[in-house]
Amino acid sequence: MTAESITGAPVDAGPAHFTRESLARYWGVTERHVDALVSTGKLRAVKIGRATRFTLADVRAFEERHARVVDAEGDEKGAPETPTLRAKVIAATRKPRPVAPAPSKPFSQRVEELRARLTPKRSTKGATR
């Protein structure tokens, strides 16, 4: 299958269809991932008898819908800056966590005071020796 560019020159657009295996290899994903895309309705598949095929138009349409542009460092360009509705609801209903005050005494001093409080005191009343 060939396509024409804007200038009218023929462009090699690749195969007219993909098999499950060839599409997985083309995208660099597993065949199970391709199956998951089909089962969730994100990717359209054509059944010809027992064979499953993916047309070039459907593959390109999926790529356009799910394409993300990244820069050289791998950061997404044009990523949505606004939070999703779920994130907004979570932020609105989340209670702020109380912040513990900074300790006024060193840790070792607090440990010694705690030990002194928890250590049973010996009584000297009625003790005979």
Image (tube, grey):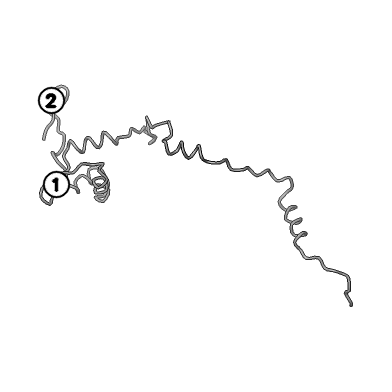
Number of labels in the image equals 2
| Tag 1–tag 2 contact (CB < 8 Å) | no
Q: Residue at x 35, y 33 (%)?
A: 70
Specify which label sits upstream in the sequence, 1 or 2.
2
Asked if residue 67 is positioned above or below residue 102 in the image, the reply reads above
Find the distance from the CA under tag 1 to the CA under tag 2. 32 Å
Mark 1: amino acid: Lys
Q: Which of label 1 and label 2 is nearer to you? A: 1
Tag 2 residue: 9
Dot 1 alpha-carbon crowd within 10 angstroms: few under 14, some 14 to 19, many 20 or more? few
Picture quarter with the C terminus:
bottom right
**Residue situated in front as seen by the camera: 17 or 47:** 47
Q: Is residue 46 left or right of residue 81?
A: left
- Identify the residue shown where x is 32% and y is 34%: 68
109, above or below 70, in the image = below
Q: Position of residue 61 (x, y in %)?
A: 22, 35
Question: Which percent across, then down, holds residue 67?
Answer: 30, 35
Q: Quadrant of the N terminus?
A: top left
**Mark 1, secondary structure of its residue:** strand
Report the residue at 19% width, 48% height from top.
Answer: 20
Q: What is the secondary structure assignment of the residue under circle 2? A: loop
Residue hosting label 1: 47
